[in-house]
Image (tube, rainbow, N blue to C red):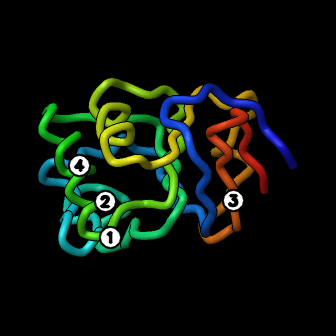
Amino acid sequence: MEVDCRVISRGKGRGPVLVSTEPLSFLGGVDPGTGRVIDQKHPLHGRSIRGKVLLIPGGKGSTVGSYVIFQMAKNETAPAAIICLNAEPIIATGAIMAGIPMVDRPSEDLLGLLEDSMEVEVDADEGKIRF
């Protein structure tokens, strides 16, 4: 299936999808050294986002979260791509700085279509999500 979306940060990323219905804060919510979600109250707690296509409603928290995403890219612990239902400036800035493909506003309800570990490709050059 192919879903249209808005491009935030260009590039292509592919991998197993990791789905959350809750927004994610990268500052204090994700360990940039390991790529694991460390926010104990988040549904993804203990899971690694490294190399995954991360599907979240959006981000939350401090603007420093952008730098956490950038650090994750330098540490090779970043997601392969990010899909937000509705992007906000913190994650968008981090993805752009880190060179992580990112899209938002998918034309279909991805939370109803995608399940953890499904193989997903984000083509943030063409504004397409394929699975």
Query: What amino acid type is highlighted by mark number 3?
Result: Val
| Residue 105: quadrant of the picture | top right
Secondary-structure class at tag 2: helix
| Residue behind mark 1 | 76
Q: Can the viewer see residue 78 in this picture?
A: yes
- Cα distance, mark 2 to mark 3? 20 Å
- Cα distance, mark 4 to mark 1? 15 Å
| Residue 88: quadrant of the picture | top left
Secondary-structure class at tag 3: strand
| Residue behind mark 2 | 73
- Cα distance, mark 4 to mark 2? 13 Å
Quick check: 43 above or below 98? Answer: below
**Crowd band around label 3 with a 10 angstrom C-alpha radius: few (<14), some (14–19), many (20+):** many
| Residue behind mark 4 | 26
Q: Position of residue 30 (x, y in %)?
A: 23, 59
| Residue behind mark 3 | 120
Question: Which callout, 4 or 3, points at the residue further toward the start of the chain?
Answer: 4
Q: Disc 1, disc 2: CB below 8 Å? A: yes
Task: Say whether residue 101 is left or right of residue 48.
Answer: right
Question: Which callout, 4 or 2, points at the residue further toward the start of the chain?
Answer: 4
The residue at the point 37 percent across, 32 percent down is 92
**Crowd band around label 1 with a 10 angstrom C-alpha radius: few (<14), some (14–19), many (20+):** some
Secondary-structure class at tag 4: loop
The nearer-to-camera label among 1 and 3 is 1
Q: Position of residue 42 (x, y in %)?
A: 29, 55
Query: What amino acid type is highlighted by mark number 1?
Result: Glu
